[in-house]
Amino acid sequence: MSRKERGNVWLGVAGIVINTKGEWLVVQKRYGGLNGKWSLPAGFVEGTETVDQAVLREIKEETGIDAEVIQLIGFRSGVIKEKISDNMAIFFLRPLDPEQVPDPQLDELYEARWMTPEQLLEDERTTSMIKVFLKVNQEAGFETREGLDPGPVFGYSSYKLFTASENED
Protein backbone atom coordinates (compact mmCIF):
# COMPACT_ATOMS: atom_id res chain seq x y z
CA MET A 1 0.00 0.00 0.00
CA SER A 2 1.50 3.34 -1.04
CA ARG A 3 1.66 6.45 1.16
CA LYS A 4 -0.92 8.12 -1.08
CA GLU A 5 -3.35 5.21 -0.60
CA ARG A 6 -2.90 5.40 3.19
CA GLY A 7 -3.75 9.10 3.34
CA ASN A 8 -2.94 10.99 6.55
CA VAL A 9 -4.19 8.34 8.97
CA TRP A 10 -2.18 5.13 8.98
CA LEU A 11 -3.15 1.85 10.63
CA GLY A 12 -0.48 -0.78 10.96
CA VAL A 13 -0.04 -4.05 12.82
CA ALA A 14 2.91 -5.83 14.41
CA GLY A 15 3.22 -9.34 15.80
CA ILE A 16 5.08 -10.63 18.82
CA VAL A 17 5.41 -14.29 17.90
CA ILE A 18 6.97 -16.43 20.64
CA ASN A 19 7.76 -20.11 20.15
CA THR A 20 7.75 -22.88 22.79
CA LYS A 21 11.44 -22.20 23.54
CA GLY A 22 10.62 -18.61 24.49
CA GLU A 23 12.30 -17.23 21.36
CA TRP A 24 10.87 -14.20 19.54
CA LEU A 25 10.37 -14.00 15.78
CA VAL A 26 12.19 -10.87 14.61
CA VAL A 27 13.10 -9.35 11.26
CA GLN A 28 15.67 -6.93 9.86
CA LYS A 29 14.04 -4.54 7.38
CA ARG A 30 15.86 -3.27 4.29
CA TYR A 31 14.26 0.19 4.30
CA GLY A 32 13.17 3.21 6.34
CA GLY A 33 13.94 4.02 9.93
CA LEU A 34 14.14 0.32 10.83
CA ASN A 35 16.77 -0.48 8.19
CA GLY A 36 19.12 -3.10 9.65
CA LYS A 37 17.42 -3.15 13.06
CA TRP A 38 15.75 -6.10 14.74
CA SER A 39 12.05 -5.33 14.71
CA LEU A 40 8.74 -7.14 14.81
CA PRO A 41 7.10 -8.42 11.63
CA ALA A 42 4.74 -5.60 10.72
CA GLY A 43 2.85 -3.82 7.99
CA PHE A 44 -0.29 -1.93 7.06
CA VAL A 45 -3.90 -3.05 7.30
CA GLU A 46 -5.69 -3.41 3.96
CA GLY A 47 -9.25 -2.21 3.45
CA THR A 48 -10.70 -5.71 3.31
CA GLU A 49 -9.31 -7.04 6.59
CA THR A 50 -9.50 -6.65 10.34
CA VAL A 51 -6.35 -5.87 12.31
CA ASP A 52 -5.95 -9.46 13.51
CA GLN A 53 -6.27 -10.77 9.94
CA ALA A 54 -3.67 -8.22 8.82
CA VAL A 55 -1.11 -9.29 11.42
CA LEU A 56 -1.43 -12.94 10.36
CA ARG A 57 -0.97 -11.95 6.71
CA GLU A 58 2.04 -9.73 7.42
CA ILE A 59 3.81 -12.38 9.51
CA LYS A 60 3.22 -14.98 6.79
CA GLU A 61 4.33 -12.63 3.98
CA GLU A 62 7.48 -11.45 5.74
CA THR A 63 8.64 -14.67 7.41
CA GLY A 64 6.68 -17.61 6.00
CA ILE A 65 5.49 -18.42 9.54
CA ASP A 66 1.84 -19.33 10.13
CA ALA A 67 0.64 -18.16 13.54
CA GLU A 68 -2.46 -17.85 15.69
CA VAL A 69 -3.49 -14.65 17.43
CA ILE A 70 -3.61 -14.96 21.20
CA GLN A 71 -4.52 -11.37 22.03
CA LEU A 72 -4.01 -7.69 21.39
CA ILE A 73 -1.23 -6.62 23.74
CA GLY A 74 -0.59 -2.99 22.84
CA PHE A 75 -1.39 -0.03 20.66
CA ARG A 76 1.08 2.59 19.47
CA SER A 77 -0.06 5.99 18.26
CA GLY A 78 1.95 8.98 17.13
CA VAL A 79 1.96 11.91 14.74
CA ILE A 80 4.72 12.16 12.13
CA LYS A 81 5.96 15.66 11.25
CA GLU A 82 2.73 17.28 12.48
CA LYS A 83 0.72 15.77 9.60
CA ILE A 84 0.38 11.96 9.65
CA SER A 85 -1.41 10.00 12.38
CA ASP A 86 0.62 6.76 12.60
CA ASN A 87 -1.14 3.99 14.56
CA MET A 88 -0.23 0.35 15.19
CA ALA A 89 -2.03 -2.55 16.88
CA ILE A 90 0.47 -4.97 18.45
CA PHE A 91 -0.54 -8.60 18.90
CA PHE A 92 0.83 -11.52 20.86
CA LEU A 93 0.82 -14.74 18.78
CA ARG A 94 2.00 -18.34 18.78
CA PRO A 95 3.43 -20.11 15.75
CA LEU A 96 1.34 -23.03 14.49
CA ASP A 97 4.58 -25.01 14.02
CA PRO A 98 7.05 -23.96 16.77
CA GLU A 99 9.91 -25.71 14.94
CA GLN A 100 9.37 -23.89 11.63
CA VAL A 101 12.40 -21.97 10.38
CA PRO A 102 11.62 -18.47 9.08
CA ASP A 103 11.81 -17.97 5.32
CA PRO A 104 12.34 -14.20 4.95
CA GLN A 105 10.89 -12.13 2.14
CA LEU A 106 14.30 -10.93 0.91
CA ASP A 107 13.02 -8.03 -1.19
CA GLU A 108 11.93 -6.32 2.10
CA LEU A 109 14.15 -8.03 4.68
CA TYR A 110 17.79 -8.84 5.25
CA GLU A 111 16.87 -11.60 7.66
CA ALA A 112 14.16 -13.20 9.82
CA ARG A 113 15.02 -15.41 12.77
CA TRP A 114 14.11 -16.65 16.23
CA MET A 115 16.05 -14.89 19.02
CA THR A 116 16.00 -15.24 22.80
CA PRO A 117 15.02 -12.27 24.96
CA GLU A 118 18.61 -12.16 26.24
CA GLN A 119 20.00 -11.93 22.69
CA LEU A 120 17.55 -9.16 21.85
CA LEU A 121 18.38 -7.16 24.98
CA GLU A 122 22.12 -7.43 24.30
CA ASP A 123 21.96 -6.53 20.60
CA GLU A 124 22.28 -2.79 19.93
CA ARG A 125 20.26 -3.24 16.73
CA THR A 126 17.11 -4.22 18.68
CA THR A 127 14.37 -1.57 18.45
CA SER A 128 13.15 0.22 21.56
CA MET A 129 9.64 -1.18 21.01
CA ILE A 130 10.90 -4.75 21.33
CA LYS A 131 12.86 -3.84 24.47
CA VAL A 132 9.68 -2.42 26.04
CA PHE A 133 7.60 -5.49 25.16
CA LEU A 134 10.27 -7.84 26.51
CA LYS A 135 9.32 -6.46 29.95
CA VAL A 136 5.53 -6.62 29.45
CA ASN A 137 3.41 -9.45 30.82
CA GLN A 138 2.03 -11.14 27.69
CA GLU A 139 -0.87 -12.49 29.76
CA ALA A 140 -2.18 -8.96 30.41
CA GLY A 141 -3.45 -8.12 26.93
CA PHE A 142 -6.94 -7.74 25.49
CA GLU A 143 -9.13 -10.68 24.55
CA THR A 144 -10.82 -10.92 21.14
CA ARG A 145 -14.60 -10.91 21.24
CA GLU A 146 -16.40 -12.13 18.13
CA GLY A 147 -20.02 -12.76 17.25
CA LEU A 148 -21.14 -9.29 18.30
CA ASP A 149 -23.57 -7.41 16.09
CA PRO A 150 -23.73 -3.63 16.52
CA GLY A 151 -26.73 -3.58 14.19
CA PRO A 152 -27.47 -3.78 10.46
CA VAL A 153 -27.39 -0.01 10.08
CA PHE A 154 -23.57 -0.09 10.06
CA GLY A 155 -23.16 -2.75 7.38
CA TYR A 156 -20.15 -4.49 8.94
CA SER A 157 -18.98 -7.57 7.05
CA SER A 158 -16.58 -8.33 9.92
CA TYR A 159 -16.68 -6.98 13.47
CA LYS A 160 -14.46 -7.71 16.49
CA LEU A 161 -14.01 -6.04 19.84
CA PHE A 162 -10.77 -6.27 21.85
CA THR A 163 -11.28 -5.87 25.61
CA ALA A 164 -9.63 -6.54 28.93
CA SER A 165 -10.55 -9.86 30.53
CA GLU A 166 -13.89 -10.09 32.26
CA ASN A 167 -13.96 -9.90 36.03
CA GLU A 168 -14.16 -13.28 37.72
CA ASP A 169 -16.98 -13.59 40.25
Image: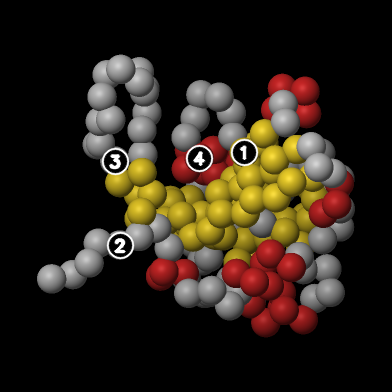
For the C terminus, the image quarter is bottom left
Q: Which residue is mark 1?
A: 11
Q: Which residue is located at x 30 percent, y 62 percent?
A: 165
Mark 2 to mark 1 CA distance (whole Å): 24 Å
Tag 3's secondary structure?
loop
Q: CA–CA distance between discs 1 and 4?
A: 9 Å
Residue 149 screen position, x and y as percent: 25, 30
> Which numbered dot is residue 165?
2
Q: CA distance from mark 3 to mark 2?
A: 14 Å
Answer with mark 2 or mark 1, whichever residue precedes in sequence.
1
Which of the two discs, 3 and 1, sits closer to the camera? 1
Residue that carries the numbered disc 3 in the rendered image: 146
Marks 2 & 1, CB-CB < 8 Å contact: no
Front label number (4 vs 2)? 2
Tell me if residue 97 comes above or below residue 104 in the rendering: below
Q: What amino acid is labelled 2 in the image? A: Ser
Answer with left or right where residue 5 lies relative to residue 163. Answer: right
Which residue position holds label 4?
A: 51
Question: How many residues crowd around disc 3 within 10 Å: few (fewer than 14), some, or many (20 or more)?
Answer: few
Q: Nearer the viewer, mark 1 or mark 4?
A: 1
Residue 87 percent coordinates (x, y):
64, 45
Residue 106 in view here = no
